[in-house]
Amino acid sequence: MNAQPVDPRRPIAPADQPACLAALEAAVRARTGLRPSAGIVLGSGLGGLVDEVTEPVSIPFSELPGWPSATAPGHAGRLILGRLDGIPVALLQGRFHLYEGNDPGLVVQPVLLMGRLGAPVIVLSNAAGGLNPAFGPGTLMAIEDHLNLTGRTPLLGPNADELGPRFPDLTNAWSPRLRDLLQAAARAEGVELASGVYVGLLGPAYETPAEVRMLRSLGGDAVGMSTVLEAIAARWAGLELCGVSLITNAGAGYSGLPLSHEEVLAAGAAAGPRFVRIIRRLVAEIAGGD
Ligand code: HPA
């Protein structure tokens, strides 16, 4: 347990991250020496991958220094290290969102920690609303690029040059190599995998229909309340990145029906097994390609 009460709003600049990560790494290393081949963040309703992990070491967020326990409904809030078909992985079940009041520096710490533990590859997943009218509920979408419309960044303030550059490049932030591996994994599993641009907003209110029309006209295919800051931090830290959105609902206004978090979780449960199959294959490919 954390000895001090944790204030998740406390600003964490990039220059503060090395000390935070050293403490986090020590807390994890007190429990396991496992070096993950990939770090995987599981979005709302996509936590089922955890059940496939063997020899799991499961660490509740509240037992890691500086991490609060509270996460969104449908998010369990733990870091799991173990093996997926024999391959060492780190899984984040639940994540820190901006809409919970968390500082951007905290939002990205799990991804930075998984990199620090040895993961060269980060896989982000999320539940999202469909902006592309062709992407109905249940669609899985490989993220090919993003729009960060949160108005926030995890890189504000003094930089830590030993972790990453002041001005990181985000061209091909979503690795073309990993996107190819994702598509190949989906084909091998007979699962359809679309591809598109993820728009990240603050939330927690869902969008208005006018906002959905605007985001579509800006080039977005899916919209959600996570992922973009983690993507920026991963690239800053030199980690290779890919991601999958599960479209849980058509964007606000498309169907005329109200949106609900229950609908999001139900769609996650329905698509979970397809997501698990793709990610298992991807992990095997990543490890096999070493
Ligand atoms: N908008 C934003 N975030 C979401 C949605 C949505 O429609 N569905 C699931 N997460």
Image: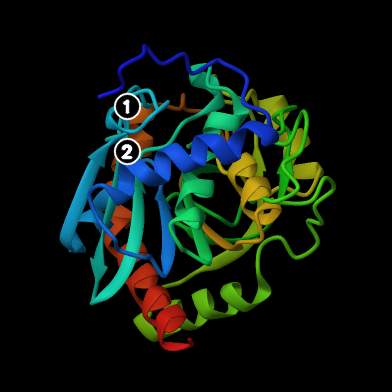
From this view, report whether residue 2 is shown above or below residue 171. Answer: above
Could you give the CA–CA distance between mark 2 and mark 1, rounded to whole angstroms?
9 Å
Between disc 2 and disc 1, the foreground one is 1
Side of 149 relative to 253 (left or right): right
Q: Which quadrant: the N terminus?
A: top left
Classify mark 2: residues with Cα within 10 Å, few (<14), some (14-19) or many (20+).
some
Q: Is mark 1 within 8 Å of ligand 1?
A: no
Side of 226 relative to 218 (left or right): left
Q: Tell which residue pokes out farthest to the left in this image.
A: 55
Residue at left 21%, top 46%? Answer: 58
Return the residue nearer the eye: 273 or 10: 10
Residue 148: where, in percent of width, then height?
Answer: 72, 39
Residue 121: where, in percent of width, then height?
Answer: 52, 66
Q: Which mark is residue 286?
A: none
**Residue indicated by mark 2:** 265
Q: Earlier in the sequence, mark 2 or mark 1?
A: 1
Side of 279 relative to 211 (left or right): left
Q: Which mark is residue 73?
A: 1
